[in-house]
Image (cartoon, grey):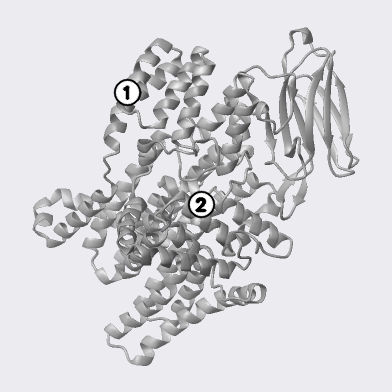
Amino acid sequence: MLDHQTLRKARALLAASRIALVAVIVLALAMRLWFWWIQARSGAVPPGDPEEYYRAAIHILHGGYHDTGKWLRPPVYPAFLALLLPAAGMNVAGALLLQACILSVGVLAFYTFGAHLFGRITGLVTALLAALFIPLASYASSLYAEALFITLLVAGLTALNDAIDRKSGRMAFGAGVILALAALTRAVGVYLIPLAAALIAWRAQSDGYRVWRWHHPAILLLLGAMLVIGPWVGRNYLVHSRLIVSDTNGGISMWYGTVRSDAEQAAGEARLAAVPNLADRQALALHMAWDIIRDDPVRFLTRMRFKIASLYALQTRSYAVGDVISIDSRGAPIVQNAGEYRLELTILADVQYIVLMLLAIGGFCFIPQPVRATPTLLWIGLATLLAALTIGHPRLRLPIVATVLPFAAYALIRLPALWRQPARFLRDRRSYAALGGSLVFLALIVSTQYIPWSAGIWYAAPGRAALDAGDLRRAESLLTLAYDANPDNPLRLIDLADLYLAQGDNERALELYRLAASMERRSLYAQAMRAITAAVLDNPAEAAAALRAIDGYWRTGNDLLEWAWNAQHMSAPSRVIPGDPAALGFYAGFAPATPDLTVGRWTLGEGRVRVRGGCGTLVVRMHGPAGRMVDISLDNWNIHERITLTGAPQEMHISLSGIRECEHNPELTVWFTSATGLLDLEMAPWYGGVAITDVQVTP
C-alpha cells in the first residue's frame, strides 16, 4: 500500500512539473510575442549585423553565401533564417514572428541545464527566469544570432556536464556537435571547444581514470566538433583560399577595440576595404591591432579594464550619459535595435540583471559540488577575456548572464533557509566569498554618471508627464530645471525641444534638435525631429542633412518610416514623393533607398501614403515588373482600383469627386498592395512590390 501511494505521489509530482513546464513555455511565448509586437512588426532590416545575417540568408536561398561583405558571418543563424523567410512569404516581420515562437521553446534547454545541475525544481525555476528575463525575450524576435546561440550554448554546456559526470564518450561527442553548432552561430564559441576537451580530460585524470579513459571522451568531443565545422572550413578554403574556422570578424573587432581616434579608425577602415580577401582583411586588422598594442601596451591594458566595466555596465547608463539611439522621448522604439528599451523597461531589465547576478554569485559559492560549476565558469572567463580583448559591448554580456541562470535559481530556492537560519550562513566561510564576489560585481556597475542624471530625471519625469498632459507652463518650469541639473545630457535638450515644438516655436525647437544631434550624432530621434521640423519650416537643406546623418549611422528603413508615420502630426501635403526629406512621416511600408531609383521608393508589398485630398484627381506615378498587379485603395472611401504593371513608368488617375465633403480637403491614406520580388541580390536585397515615385492630388 505504501509503495502504491509513493508511486501515485511520484506520478502526480511528475504531472505537476510537466504542467508547470508547459505554463513556463506559454509565458515565454507571451513575452516574446509582446516584444515582437513592439519592435519587429515593421519588417525592416537594421544595418550592421542584422543586415549581414539577412544578406547571408538571401544568398543561401539563391544557392550561395554572402562572401563580399565587410566580413564573413558564421552560417547557422543565416541558415535558420533562410528556413523561416520562405515560410513567411519572404516577409521579415513574419519570419521574426516564427523565430520568436520557435525560440520560446528554447526555455526547455534552460530547464534541462538547471535540472541536470540541481534537480527538477531548480530546472523549472531556471526556465522561469529565462522566460521572464527581458533581454532574452527581446532578442528572440530580432535579427541577431544571440538568442539561437544562447540556446545552443546552454544545450552544449548541459551535454558537456553530462559527459564529464558519466565519463561518456557518446555524450562527449554530442557535446562537441552542439558546441560546434554554437560556434558556427557566434564565433566566440570556437574557443570554448578545445577548452571543453581539455576540461573533460583533466576531470577524468583527476578522478584517477587510466590514460585511455580520459583521452577517449576528449577526442570524441573534438571529433564531433570537427564533423560539424569541417565542411564549413573546407567550403571557405575553396572560396577564399584561406583557413576560416567560423568567421572573419574577430580580428577586426580586436582592432576596433584598440583604435585611438576617429582619424585612425577612418584610415584603418580604408586600408581594410582595399583588401578583397576576407581572411587577409582579418589578418591585416590583427596586424594593425598588434601594432597599436606595441606602441602603447599600458593604454591597451587600461582599456581592457574599461571594456570589462563596459561589458557588465547597466543599460540604464545609456540614459545617464544620453547616448540613447533608438528610443524617442515618449519611450517608443524608432527602429528595431534589440537591447535598447524605454526607460521604465530598461530599469526593470537592469534590476533583473543585478538580482540574477547576485543570486548567481551566491549559487556558485554554495553549490554542493563546486567542480560542477567549472564548465560555466570556464565559459564566463573566456567570454569576459574575449570582450576585454575586442569590444566590451553590453550585447556580449547576454550569453554570460544566460549561462548563470541555473545558479541563480539554485540560490533563489535556498533563500528561505537563509532567512530561517541567518546565523548559520554568517558562520560559513562561503558567505564571505559570496560577499566579496558581489562587491566586485557592484563595483563594475557603479558609475558617477548616475548622480547628475538622477538630479535631472527628478524634474524631467514629471515635466514630460505635464507636457504629455498639455500643461505647458508646468512642463516648461520642470524641464528647465531638469536641463539646469544635467546640461551635458542631450536628452534634456530634446525635452526642451519637444516643449518648444508643442508651444509652436518651431525655429527654437529646430535649433535645440540640431544641438542635441551635435552632442549625440547617433540619436535617431533628434535627427528625425530635426528633419520633420525643418520640413515644416520649408528648409529642405536642413531636412536632407538630418536624413543624411541618419543614413550615415543607421538608415531610413521602414521601422523609422512607421515611427514617423505615427509621430508626424502636421497636416499632410497635397503631394508626397516617397524618399524625399520633406515627406518623412507621410509614407510607410517602403524599402530603404535603392540605387535604381533617384526619385521614389519601392513598397514592401503593402505601402501607404498620406496626402491632403480634394475634389480633383489623385495621380500616382509608379513602375515595376511587367505583369505584376497592384491594388490601390483609399481608406474609408470605398475606392479600389487595380493596375497591371508594364515594366515602364505608368500613371494612375483616380477621381476624388465622389468623396463626401471633398471640398474640405480631408486627409487621404492611399494603400498600394502587390506581390513582391527580390530587387537585386547584391545592391538591394529587399523584396519590393512597386516603385512609387509620386503621389499627388490635383485640382
Nearest the camera: 37 or 617? 617
Circles 2 and 1, Cβ within 8 Å, touching? The answer is no
Secondary structure under badge 1?
A: helix
Compared with residue 610, is residue 353 higher up or lower down, i.e. above or below? below
Residue at label 2?
104
Q: Residue at x 48, y 78 (%)?
A: 173
Quick check: can you spot residue 116? Answer: no
Picture quadrant where residue 452 is located: top left
Drawn side of residue 1 relative to residue 258, left or right:
left
Q: Quadrant of the C terminus?
A: top right
The local crowd at label 2, few if under 14, some if 14 to 19, many if 20 or more residues have their Cα within 10 Å, is many
Residue 169, labelled with which disc?
none
Q: Amino acid at mark 2?
A: Ser
Compared with residue 663, is residue 566 higher up or lower down, i.e. above or below? below
Compared with residue 562, is residue 254 higher up or lower down, i.e. above or below? below
Picture quadrant where residue 580 is located: top right
Residue at label 1?
484
Q: Quadrant of the N terminus?
A: bottom left
Residue 686 location (% of width, % of height) = 71, 48
Drawn side of residue 695 relative to residue 450, left or right:
right
